[in-house]
Amino acid sequence: MLVCWGNNSAGQLNDIPWGAFTNVSAARRHSCAVRTNGALACWGDNSAGQLNGIPGGTFTQVSARARCRRG
């Protein structure tokens, strides 16, 4: 179970997923976590597309950042 607290000015505390997780990473306005089955769950602000295109597959770690770097 995840427990989150703090400023909710951008919805950072809205729609926190239920379940068991192995890894969690919080950025300023959104967070992501790896479920025990390896799937990703992300929640919070999506004003810059932070939550769009969350990849499928199996993961062991995740790192939430203010902006994704491509290239």
Image (cartoon, grey):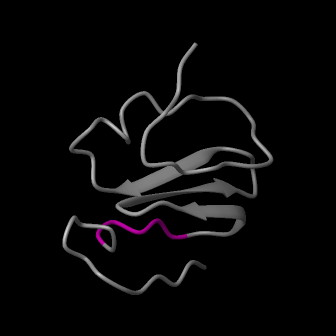
Give residue 19's position: percent from left, percent from top. Answer: 60, 69
Residue at 34% over, 61% down: 29
What secondary structure prevails in the magenta region? loop
Q: Quadrant of the C terminus?
A: top right
Residue 24 in the figure: left or right of residue 55: right
- Count of numbered tags: 0
Residue 20 in the figure: left or right of residue 6: right
Residue most extreme to the right: 60
Give residue 51's position: percent from left, percent from top. Answer: 37, 41
Picture layout, residue 52 above or below residue 32:
above
Picture layout, residue 37 above or below residue 59:
below
Residue 62 in the figure: left or right of residue 53: right
Give residue 2's position: percent from left, percent from top. Answer: 56, 78
Residue 53 in the figure: left or right of residue 24: left
Residue at 63% over, 50% down: 63
Query: Nearest the camera: 52 or 35?
Result: 52
Q: Which residues are magenta?
A: 14-18
